[in-house]
Amino acid sequence: MNWFHWLTIWAAFLQAGISHAIQLSIDDDDSIKSAAEQAAHGMFMWYSGNETGQNPGAFPEKWWEGSALFMAALQYWKYTGDTTYNAETSQGMEHQSGDAGDYMPSNYSTYLGNDDQGFWGLAAMLAAELQFPDVKDGFSWLSLAQGVFNTQVERWDTTSCGGGLRWQLFTYQAGYAMKNTISNGVLFQLSARLARYTNNQTYADWAEKIYDWMGSTPLLNEDTWHIADSVNIDDNCKSPGDNQWSYNYGTFIVGSAYMYNYTNDDKWLKRVNGFLGTTFSTFFPKNFGGNTMQEPCEPLEVCNNNEILFKGLVTSWLAYTALFIPSTKDKIQPKLKASAEAAADSCVGMGNNTCGVRWYQHKWDGWNGMEEQIIATNVFTSNLIIESSDKGPVTSDTGGDSKSNPNAGSSSDGDDGGQTLKKITTGDKAGAGILTALFVGVWVGMVAFMITGAG
Ligand SMILES: *[C@@H]1O[C@H](CO)[C@@H](O)[C@H](O)[C@H]1NC(C)=O
Ligand SMILES: *[C@@H]1O[C@H](CO)[C@@H](O)[C@H](O)[C@H]1NC(C)=O
Ligand SMILES: *[C@@H]1O[C@H](CO)[C@@H](O)[C@H](O)[C@H]1NC(C)=O
Ligand SMILES: *[C@@H]1O[C@H](CO)[C@@H](O)[C@H](O)[C@H]1NC(C)=O
Ligand SMILES: *[C@@H]1O[C@H](CO)[C@@H](O)[C@H](O)[C@H]1NC(C)=O
């Protein structure tokens, strides 16, 4: 042994002493699996829905986040083979599905937005596509996705702006006066995925219709491949709220990739590549090397819990896009690798591998929560997905056997003021009002800023 050897051992010893890290070798599947295992463990530390006296899958105050947790769990199971969280996932996804099997559970349905319900629909769709077994007594995964589709297309609103889904469902919600990208973008994606899985053209027609409507408003621009966040019905959807969020782009990228796979029409390929360009330049900034993902709210530390989750959704969607369209793989893969490596560097918090928000800092940034664990799990498993062409989303012709029910869901479960609409208590209204007032306040402020900034 020479002095250099001893120095190396000493350095390794010091490192082990000071940091507890997720060690990630990005080209080694076992290493990625082990990183995902640690992140997923942390993610379920925040979940108590399977304990006695708790409501499975319920996240009061942030109901939709359950869908993000379970989507991460489904991908974790499929691409690592670890079944640890399957029972909880199955139970939670069934329990929240509501009496009609359309993710309008009465505890939450009085203040939901179309986007909240839509994300649960995507979780059910993912379960069907990844061949997560249907439960014995309950709704099949496919029928739950169909239930969400059926209830949402009934809300397609031609009374203003030529169509589109409103953000929220009820007149007492402030978001009722808006049409937003993510609500329409999630239904677009869900329609595309249902079309491919079931080979039923009705779903594809809806995907086309939603995309075209988006393009007829300032929300989606095919010349610049720019996607805005929301429009207000008051001014006939003319002036967009232009915050840039990665999930708005991601949902149109992956939805277009599914449509390309289903139709083989080059217009969808062009759209995938167009939106990939703006996504890369906006969310993978050059100053961090151009491959590490960052949500624009991160540098000022103003991301809320919803917004923290976007990177996790988008990295997963990019991985599936690369699976469907191999010509995009060389562009997408370096971004998933660098982002996973940066995320792993952030998972050194609190002496127990707690992950942070700002991956680009390559250290723990002091943040912790279920959302941070979910996005780390997602970015690790995305690197497995992109190499798993043999385990891509199936269809009913390629092994998918989740039971179909084209008539799932029902309009009588509350969203149209039907008979079973539970009496809305003042408490419900107040809670909903607080949430939406916050959102709309931000939006109004932003528009004011844009107007004064332009003037
Ligand atoms: C890590 O420690 C923090 C603080 O004690 C705790 O809240 C969190 O649940 C722990 N996470 C894990 C994965 O053990
Ligand atoms: C909840 O699930 C976790 C596994 O993720 C398990 O360790 C725990 O025992 C379960 N709790 C109950 C009450 O089943
Ligand atoms: C709704 O609330 C009731 C009462 O707390 C609870 O028993 C039920 O499990 C909840 N349902 C859901 C879907 O969370
Ligand atoms: C659709 O995806 C499957 C893999 O899931 C692939 O085998 C097939 O070639 C794709 N079709 C088109 C038109 O891209
Ligand atoms: C196709 O989907 C539509 C919309 O849900 C449904 O009305 C129709 O019955 C479906 N067709 C078949 C053959 O399943």
Image: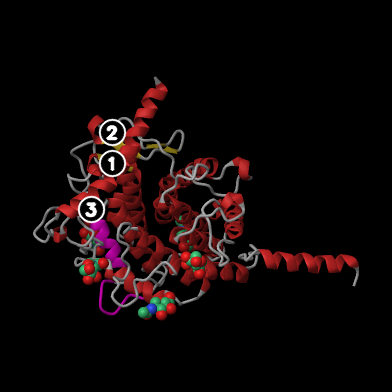
Q: Which x, y percent locates residue 404?
A: 27, 68
Depth order, front residue of 406/370:
370
Instruction: Please provide the residue range marked out in magenta.
Output: 133-150
Q: Which mark is residue 179?
A: 1
As measured in the structure, the alpha-carbon distance from the residue carrying label 1 to the one carrying label 2 is 8 Å
Task: Report the quarter where the C terminus lies.
Answer: top left
Q: Residue at x 42, y 36 (%)?
A: 222
Ligand 3: which quarter?
bottom left
Q: Which x, y percent locates residue 26?
A: 63, 62
Q: Which mark is residue 237?
A: 2
Left or right of 345? Residue 156 is left
Q: Residues within 10 Å of mark 3 (few under 14, many from 20)?
A: many
Left or right of 37? Residue 302 is left
Inspect the image, locate mark 3, and give the three-letter code of the amino acid beneath it: Tyr
Query: Any atom of ligand 5 within 8 Å of the CB at mark 2?
Result: no
Task: Report the quarter where the N terminus lies.
Answer: bottom right
Q: Residues within 10 Å of mark 2 (few under 14, many from 20)?
A: many
The answer to whether any part of residue 194 appears in the image is: no
Mark 1 lies on a secondary structure that is strand
Residue occupying the far right of the picture: 2
Q: Are marks 1 and 2 in contact (CB under 8 Å)?
A: yes
Depth order, front residue of 264/115:
115
Inspect the image, locate mark 2, and give the three-letter code of the amino acid beneath it: Cys
Q: Residue at x 23, y 53 (%)?
A: 111
Q: Which mark is residue 111?
A: 3
Of the numbered discs 3 and 2, the one sitting upstream in the chain is 3
Query: Can you say whether 283 is above or below 224 in the image?
Result: below
Inspect the image, locate mark 1, and give the three-letter code of the amino acid beneath it: Lys
